[in-house]
Amino acid sequence: QVQLVESGGGSVQAGGSLRLACAASGYTYSGNCIAWFRQAPGKEREGVAAIYTPSGPTYYSDSVKGRFTISLDNGKNTMYLQMNSLRPEDTAMYYCAANSPVCGARFRAPFSYWGQGTQVTVSS
């Protein structure tokens, strides 16, 4: 049984940083696309970052480019999203997703597995 478990969410002031983690069990991050999505209340889910495992390329939405970094620790089978210079508009539930055959900045390819989500709240 595949499980993706996110951690690292929380509340932070604007300009601060958080690092989200997504640990996989029953699944190995290798040879496919993994990604982070987010969904704010009343808005559609949007992709923010993706990487074709194990080492790239990476893709970012325009809204987070230059501030967020997606990475993968193969030894721990865990992916990360480092979020710097956070803004109130980054407030959302963040989800990790895995096992898509295609990676791209449009984040439209289907993902087989999803985590349960971790809340990120940025106050001004």
Image: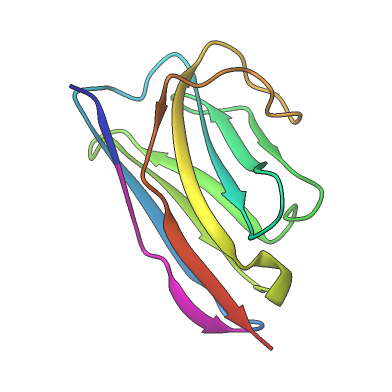
* Total numbered labels placed on residues in the image: 0
Residue 50, located in which quarter of the rendered image?
top right
Q: Which colour scheme is used?
A: rainbow
* Image quarter hosting the C terminus: bottom right
Could you say which is closer to the camera, residue 70 or residue 102?
A: 102
Vertical order, 51 against 115 (above or below): above
Image quadrant containing the N terminus: top left
107 horizontally vs 17: left or right: right
Across and down, in percent, residue 27 comes to 25, 22
Foreground pick, 31 / 25: 25
Q: Is residue 41 above or below residue 38?
A: below
Instruction: Please identify the residue farthest to the right as the structure is shown.
Output: 62
Does 124 appear above or below 119? below
Q: Is the magenta stretch mostly helix, strand or loop?
A: strand
| Left or right of 38, for residue 55 | left
Q: Where is residue 105 in the image (x, y as percent from the top left)?
A: 74, 31
Q: Position of residue 96 (x, y in %)?
A: 45, 41
Left or right, 1 with respect to 47, comes to left
Instruction: Report the span colored magenta.
Output: 5-13
Name the residue rendered at 46%, 64% in the picture: 119
